Image (spheres, rainbow, N blue to C red):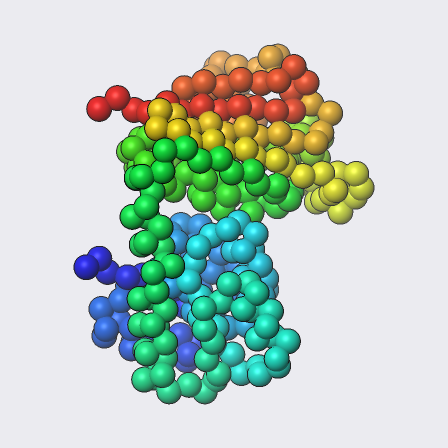
């Protein structure tokens, strides 16, 4: 049986150490994070078989972590450990997909029994992966906010099954993920926020100005009200990603060549190069606010 991975998210170091010690003795691969933000980064790198999280934490609490996981439809079985006993909190966590919850302080035996129960559930990730090779066609439509962290996780979520589906190997999957991530970031920054790459072209003050304007527009209407629509289509022969922003569009045909000697070290333009390099087909609409990426099944 494959080694199960468990991610522990808790701001109390002593709680993390106790759980890590117990779980490692049981043969589990254990990851840890001090808050929800770190937890999301860990999930971005590798979706665990089980998430154990506290609720009250700095930077990003457990509710925000669960909400982000829920929005992205990431099937991560979750156990909540908390000193809070409010009925409203319990109900909210259950609505966000939590499988079980344990009150602090907890007994080690109780925790281990709960972990084993959740991991043995047929609704876990392993059961879903077993079904993936039998899916002939699939379509998903996701509406994403202008949030770099969410876009990064979305690129992972929408490419993680490509090797299982037989579209490509794990190396190519990472290349597709990079192309998708660049497309999503372009949709946010240059599409919805209408920021020109020229702001980054001269360095120094311009780089600071670019970041400042981006942060400002993330708080201003109409920029912060715009969303990114992603349509994902899978068949046995190919996978297609369509990314559409709500901006005014841009002239993608007149972008400078990122590999020209005069442009190779400039901090913009490489995203389009990576997209064209890693995808088999790239098609823009006339307006320049919708890009379609196609990856054909690799030949054996």
Left or right of 176? Residue 140 is: right
Quadrant in which residue 279 is drawn: top left
Q: Residue 223: image x %, image y %? A: 75, 38
Q: Residue 270: image x %, image y %? A: 50, 25
Confirm whether residue 179 shows in the render.
no
80 to 262, vertically: above or below: below
Q: Residue 242: image x %, image y %? A: 54, 28
User: Observer-nearest residue: 69 or 267?
Assistant: 69
Please report the residue visible at 45 percent of the width from the left and 23 percent of the height from the top: 294
User: Observer-nearest residue: 94 or 228?
Assistant: 94
Left or right of 231? Residue 138 is: left
Left or right of 200? Residue 94 is: left
143 to 292, vertically: above or below: below
244 to 63, vertically: above or below: above
Please report the residue visible at 44 percent of the width from the left and 50 percent of the height from the top: 44
Instruction: Work out which quarter of the rendered image holds the N terminus and state it.
Output: bottom left
Q: Residue 40: image x %, image y %? A: 49, 56
Q: Which residue lies furthest to the right in this view?
A: 221
Please report the residue visible at 49 percent of the width from the left and 46 percent of the height from the top: 153
């Amino acid at each position: 049986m494959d080694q199960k991975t468990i991610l522990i998210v808790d701001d109390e170091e002593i709680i993390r150490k106790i759980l890590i010690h117990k779980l490692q003795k049981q043969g589990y691969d254990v990851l840890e994070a001090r808050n929800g933000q770190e937890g999301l980064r860990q999930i971005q790198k590798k979706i665990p078989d089980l998430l154990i999280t506290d609720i009250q934490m700095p930077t990003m609490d457990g509710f925000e972590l669960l909400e982000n996981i829920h929005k992205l439809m990431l099937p991560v079985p979750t156990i909540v450990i908390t000193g809070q006993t409010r009925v409203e909190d319990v109900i909210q966590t259950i609505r966000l997909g939590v499988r079980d919850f344990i009150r602090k302080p907890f007994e080690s035996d109780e925790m281990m029994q709960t972990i084993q129960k959740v991991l043995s559930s047929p609704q876990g990730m392993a059961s879903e992966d077993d079904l993936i090779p039998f899916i002939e066609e699939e379509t998903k439509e996701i509406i994403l906010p202008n949030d770099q962290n969410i876009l990064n996780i979305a690129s992972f979520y929408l490419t993680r099954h490509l090797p299982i589906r037989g579209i490509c190997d794990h190396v190519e999957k990472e290349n597709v993920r990079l192309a998708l991530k660049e497309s999503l970031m372009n949709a946010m920054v240059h599409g919805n926020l209408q920021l020109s790459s020229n702001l980054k072209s001269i360095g120094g003050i311009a780089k600071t100005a670019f970041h400042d304007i981006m942060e400002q527009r993330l708080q201003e209407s109409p920029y912060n009200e715009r969303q990114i629509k992603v349509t994902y289509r899978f068949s046995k022969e190919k996978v297609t990603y369509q990314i559409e922003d709500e901006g005014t569009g841009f002239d993608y045909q007149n972008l400078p060549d990122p590999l020209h000697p005069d442009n190779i070290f400039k901090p913009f333009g490489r995203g389009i190069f990576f997209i064209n390099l890693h995808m088999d087909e790239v098609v823009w609409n006339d307006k320049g606010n919708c890009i379609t990426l196609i990856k054909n099944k690799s030949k054996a």
